[in-house]
Amino acid sequence: MEMEMEIESHVNNHDQEELNRQKTVEKLFPKGMILLLNCALLSIGNTGGPLLLRLYFIRGGKRVWLSCWLESGGWPIMLIPLLASYVYRVRKSKEKAKLFFLTPFLFISGAVLGVLTGVDDWLYAYGVSKLPVSTFSLIVSTHVGFTAGFAFLIVKQKFTSYSINTIFLLTVAAVVLGVHTSSDRPNGISNLEYFTGFFMTLGASALYGFVLPMVEFTYKKSKTKLTYTLVIEMQMIMSLFATAFCTIGMIAIPREAKEYELGETKYYTVLVFNAIVWQFFFLGAIGIIFSASSLLSGIMIAILLPITETLAVAFYHEKFSPEKGISLALSLWAFVSYFYGDYKQTKQLQQSIESKTNIANATNYDVSA
């Protein structure tokens, strides 16, 4: 009888562990889905954003302040998922649902980071206006090095051999991409404008490489439980303050619209889609930080840049040099390297947890016996 009770107790413990494991999987699965969603949003924003911004300039647009305003001016779009989340919480909760989850700390942090993002938008827009896509993409891809460095200093990011290999491959891809870029220099751009655009873009890469780890640092220092709704609220505040910084760019739109090569209607269409697609970029970048890390967010941005190059060849008929092909292959290699390393690390962690669980079960069974 006593032996039967011991066996039954062991079975119940095993069932409870299986139940706990299922609950863990159920918690991890939605976060994995959120990560995939944000990777998709970042892919759309990171490839479509520069192309639409370049379209604005090559067809007659000249306002750098306006183009930087477009990078964050679509922030009201964030109200749609926030409203949907609030309605869901109202229907699910018996008590009065909170309208916003932002704390004063997160609001102030979002405001400061938003202003920095606004400065970054202006540097970025100036670079797009003066540089060809190939040179521009080369410089922007260097931000993964800045992100890695700041992530190490600010959030104590740990590096594996796979993540180091990924950063190395992306750096090599950027160097390869820069070969013969001087032949792609836009007509009508002086040497001073060209090199000013070069250093402005480099500054934008360094600044955004600082902003991404600072967002992760803000998450870690926040005493509020982080949810995806809170992440959207944070991004909305950042975009709002970035837009406030860039609002001066709205001057003289009517005159420029009438002179636009594609016509006034398509002019406003380009502006609207610019604003929408850039929100995909920012939400995807900050969402990946929530689901994983600022380093992964930076790596994803760098990996997608050669795809932007390929799309520029398709839509703007730029030359697809062998260097661009090699850069694309290296970026894909870096992508596989990072996620293979992440897969191996996750698998080893699961095996370690299962091994410890089995040892604990055996110890408990021996003691009870």
Image (tube, rainbow, N blue to C red):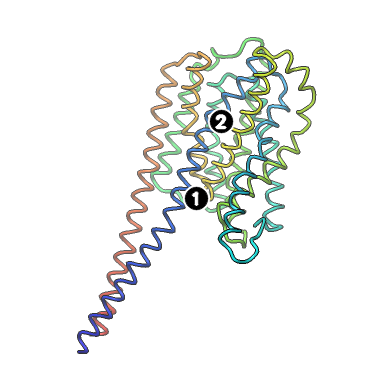
Q: Is residue 275 above or below residue 94?
A: above
Which residue appears at 52% of the width and 17% of the height?
181
Q: Secondary structure at mark 2?
A: helix
Percent position of residue 186, x then y = 61, 13
Nearer to us of marks 2 and 1 is: 1
Which residue appears at 64% of the width and 25% of the height?
127
Residue 92 or residue 45, whichever sits in front? 92
Q: Is residue 271 above or below residue 104?
A: above
Residue 140: image tag: 2
Quadrant position of the C terminus in the picture: bottom left
Residue 364: image tag: none
Percent position of residue 33, x then y = 44, 48
Q: Is residue 129 above or below residue 284?
A: above
Which residue appears at 48% of the width and 17% of the height?
313
Residue placed under numbered mark 1 in the picture: 291
Residue 110 or residue 333, whichever sits in front? 110
Give me the C-alpha separation between circle 2 and circle 1: 23 Å
Say which quarter of the image contains residue 147. Answer: top right
Q: Is residue 353 above or below residue 157?
A: below
Q: Is residue 190 something that shows in the picture?
A: no
Crowding near pointer 1: few (<14 within 10 Å), some, many (20+)? Answer: many
- Amino acid at circle 2: Val
Residue 176 is left or right of residue 254, and the answer is left
Residue 340 is left or right of residue 285, and the answer is left
Residue 273 is left or right of residue 348, and the answer is right
User: How many callouts does the rendering have?
Assistant: 2
Q: Is residue 247 something that shows in the picture?
A: yes
Q: Secondary structure at mark 1?
A: helix
- Amino acid at circle 1: Ser
